[in-house]
Amino acid sequence: MNSAPVPAEDLASTGKINLLNVDRHALEAFFVARGEKAFRASQVLQWIYQRGCDDISQMSNLAKSLRGWLGEQGEIRLPAIEREQRSRDGTVKWLLRLDDGNGIETVFIPEEDRGTLCISSQVGCSLNCSFCSTARQGYNRNLSTGEIVAQLWIAQRTLRAYGYGDRPITNIVLMGMGEPLLNFDNVVGAIGLMLDDFAFGLSKRRVTLSTAGVVPEIDHLREVCDVSLAVSLHAPNDALRDQLVPINRKYPLRELIAACKRYVDRQPRRRITFEYVMLAGINDGVEHARELVRLLKGVPSKLNLIPFNPFPGSGYDTSAADAIDRFRDIAMAADIMTVTRKTRGDDIDAACGQLAGSVFDRTRRSQRFPVRVEERFQ
Ligand code: SAH
């Protein structure tokens, strides 16, 4: 997992290793190669991730000479917070500016019994789901492991300063911008740091990766780190899903559902969370609900109904509340555990599918919205 201690992209800018890109094993190897004890790596991780330290010279349980050496080799380099917005419901959204000028968004969603951080995995997204605003931005590149964990680091430090307690983030969802399974190695590297007891120390049940359905990578994930899995389903048949989630043309429902079953196969109590965006008149009818029930038969599932979050020019409307309730009732009657996701942070465009960041679009420039943050960089 993320064993190359020096990603090439890192050396390019400052000549130093960004320690956020390095997992414990790589860091241990780094110290051992210098004749130091491996446990120094755990100490450094604790400084960075538990104490929120970004200054190697302050790591006071390392000898001064060791700090000096580490500071020559490495650094803790974080994206800049370009903008922070707070919703009236307590949701906080950050726009982070990366080294190359691209912008990504990260959202904190406080609830009574937990604090969930929704993080991005790519700059933009290449999957082109018809109802998602990130898709309109096009795709630029994968985030590095360091850029993924930096979102967590920055949110934790900021929330601590706001008095949210010492461990404000209890859950992570990889549901921000991008398709995490198309950035497999860096995402798995970042998950390693989320789960590492010397870093963020979260349990794997509290880390959820959401995918539009990259079937081979679902199997791959199961082999390397079986965190909780959410699948963006959104349609109960291939004809409709081909339209809404175009990756379905490559990996149709039969293959997707089989991969979901395999994912939870060896873990009797686990379930796949299926996300289903409620689009008025498109996928929210009684017949769709019945078809969905048939599709999910035999799959240990939770169903998450997401009222569509509108954005300008989307061409879709949110389903009426009674249509959502009817849909939920049909699923519940078939013993599918179903919740309607509460829309959070929509006043600051922080809700599902509204994250836009600012992407230097390489793929779909002509289809972009006329007024966007990224236009400032042209
Ligand atoms: N690419 C991954 C990660 C993104 S998760 C995936 O597709 O799962 C973001 C979730 O919000 C997905 O379920 C996505 O389909 C959903 N979503 C996208 N646009 C939305 C919108 N406008 N309203 C509600 N949900 C939306």
Image (cartoon, helix red, strand yellow):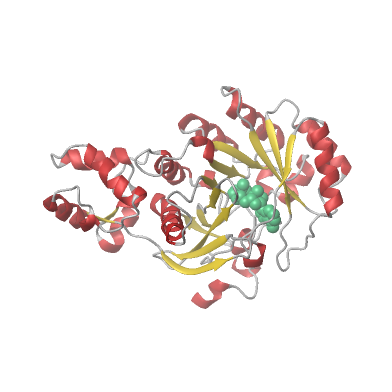
At 13% across and 53% down in the image, what residue appears? 64
Q: For this rendering, which residue is in front, 123 or 284?
A: 284
Question: In the rendered image, is residue 129 in sight?
Answer: no
Q: For this rendering, which residue is in front, 278 or 11?
A: 278
Question: In the rendered image, is residue 254 in sight?
Answer: yes
x and y percent of residue 24 in the render? 31, 40
x and y percent of residue 178 in the render? 55, 53
At 66% across and 29% down in the image, what residue appears? 258
x and y percent of residue 37 in the render? 17, 37
Q: For this rendering, which residue is in front, 83 or 229?
A: 83
Image quarter where the N terminus lies is top left
In the image: residue 97, left or right of residue 357: left
- Number of marks present in the image shown: 0
Q: For this rendering, which residue is in front, 11 or 332?
A: 332
Residue 250 to residue 361: above or below: above
In the image: residue 304, left or right of residue 161: right
At 66% across and 32% down in the image, what residue appears? 255
Residue 187 to residue 377: above or below: above
At 48% across and 55% down in the image, what residue appears? 164
x and y percent of residue 54 in the render? 31, 58
